[in-house]
Image (cartoon, rainbow, N blue to C red):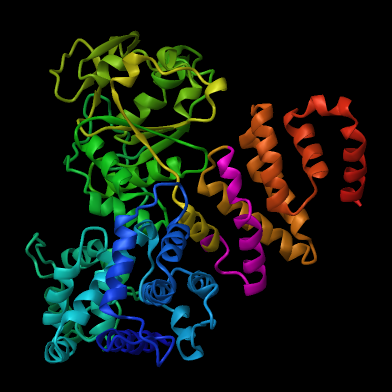
Amino acid sequence: MKRPLIYSVTREWLDAVARGGSLFLPEASVWTPETIEALYQRIVGDPQTDSSGFQEKLLHQVHQEGEAAQRLAAEAMFVFQIKDASGRAATKRAQIQALLAGLEPSVRIPERLEDALSFGMARYGSGRMRSLYDYLFVLRLAKRWAQTTAEDRQTLLVDPDAFRTLLDDVHEKGAVFAREATKHLVHPEAFEPIAALTAKQKILREVGQVKVRTDTDLDQELRDLRRRMTAEGFPEGFSFYDTDIRPLWNPPDIETPDGEGPDGEEPTPTTPQPRVASRLRLSDVVEAAEDARLVIPERVLAAVVAALNSGKHVILTGAPGTAKTTLAELVARTAERAGRCRGHVLATATADWSTYETVGGYRPRPQDGGLEFAPGLVLDAILHERWLVLDEMNRANTDRALGPLFTVLSGQAVAIAAEQNGRPVRIRPEATAPDESFHDYVVPAGWRIIATTNILDRALLFDLSFALMRRFAFIEVNCPDHDGYLGLIHDAVADLEEEVRGRAEAVVGALLPLREVRELGPALFRDAARFVAGMLADLPTASRVELALAAFHAYLLPQFEGIDEREAGELRSRLTLASGSSASVVTALLRRSLGVFAAERTSGFSDDVGEADAEHSS
């Protein structure tokens, strides 16, 4: 356990700031107020609006400012990186050295500091999307620390609450991770090694039975709770993430058995089991997303929560591989824990769907072969108070499959052309009046549909009608930035040996520019990284070309179906560069798989391709 190293390094950094010195170069003046201000204003005053990641944008901004800014930016990146336990040390080092590239004389991270990059305090999770804010927090704190008198700095280093007040003054929205982590790194005896406010709140609610309000002093309450638990027999220095303590505040999901009511009996349609409708909380969804390692902007999560709480159903849109279905199920599980439902049902839409599959219809009785009404998947989900997660919704003809539900989704009861127990079947919202002349299926007030659509499948899909669209809120699940992709690729292979992990990350990371041809979600590259790692386990001598083309063919190629010749030309250029293969081999691959470049067969190019194919297959 080398976490104490990052404590001493953090104090060493504050000392370097106080004297205008340097972490990397003992005799240099790096953390001067003038250089800190210049770099801060360069980043804030010259925002980069392209689609590149935080690291690429920072490199561009720093090199415009000059060598002094380069040195400062690299040391600030080091301070930023030592807090994060989710990144690989080699990746962190590479990002820092990239900022130092080109300096004369050259500058490298001192060996005594390198180990600090191997640990960290907490995992970023979706916080990786807030890299800019946390990086700027380092500069704002440095600026304030440099302006503070030596006497006041000494007080701040021995008074945890005074230091916390300073951080609160420096903090701006979006840098919660940096603020909470810095509190602990400077005063580990006073502040928990927890960077997520939602986790602190949940520990206090579930373990400490504290009524958490907006003005609750979370840190003081956690100190009091730690003292009480130690007095009750928990070991000194325990962690709230220990395997015997974490379940007290963050228990694993409990699955509800299918088809069971309160006493193991099938609940009847006319007597639905009551639920206490409660609002979804954004903090719970954010925490669940972080635990699941989803890199999804918090504003997307906030939009989903707001739509569901306002009474809307939701359709998540986005490119393939953006974790739309994973997010939909995660929100449904969070709703179950909040008491909004009794679980969820996942179904994938098809073009064959009709009301028979969704609402229900007559089916033979097993005992005598006679016909009786049986609910379809939507009515069955309503019956058991399970939210419906509808994957690839626009693959179905929604007017035909869901038409009778339009009225119900708008708050009105609707009868369907079927009978059950001698009475017409009716679907009605919970708020409408019952009528004993109908066999009612009652839709709970908190029941929701969360659907997904794939924006690249338009040629194969039915259009959603305006009548249906009025019942849903459409929320786009954006792709993360470049750093987010790299983080997910790393996480996919993080538990493997260093050599395998490094090669898999390099091969798949090189394929990321293919997103410039067609947007591809991060899950595709995550799966490709695992695929490459698996190939290396069986074929350790496989070349970069073999690995890259195999990963492309297995996971990315299907997403380029239907591209035109111009897009195909761009794809060929980028794939040739990314894989290290020849243009002729890539041309042959795309021609066979996508049917492009047919005209080039008549230009004499096909002979070259044949030779290249033979060479590649050998």
| In the depicted structure, whether residue 316 falls above or below residue 412 | below
Displayed quadrant of residue 293: bottom left
Q: Is residue 505 magenta?
A: yes
**Residue furthest out toward the top:** 417
Displayed quadrant of residue 76: bottom left
Q: Depth check: 183 or 271 in front?
A: 183
Q: Is residue 378 magenta?
A: no
Q: Position of residue 221 (x, y in %)?
A: 12, 74
Q: Depth check: 68 or 114 in front?
A: 68
| In the depicted structure, whether residue 236 falls above or below residue 406 | below
Q: Is residue 366 visible in the rendered structure shown here?
A: yes
Name the residue rendered at 66%, 30% in the picture.
566
| In the depicted structure, whether residue 132 falls above or below residue 551 | below
Q: Is residue 233 left or right of residue 241?
A: left
Q: Position of residue 196 (x, y in %)?
A: 27, 65
The quarter of the image holding the N terminus is: bottom left
Q: Position of residue 371 (x, y in %)?
A: 45, 12
Q: Is residue 94 left or right of residue 127?
A: right
Name the residue rendered at 63%, 62% in the picture.
506
Q: Main secondary structure of the magenta part?
A: helix
Q: Is residue 272 left or right of residue 317?
A: left
Name the residue rendered at 43%, 74% in the picture.
74
Q: Position of residue 580 (x, y in %)?
A: 75, 54
Please give the count of numbered marks on the rendered protein: 0
Q: Which residues are magenta?
A: 491-517
Q: Is residue 535 left or right of residue 464?
A: right
Q: Depth check: 542 or 394 in front?
A: 542
Name the residue rendered at 50%, 54% in the picture.
485
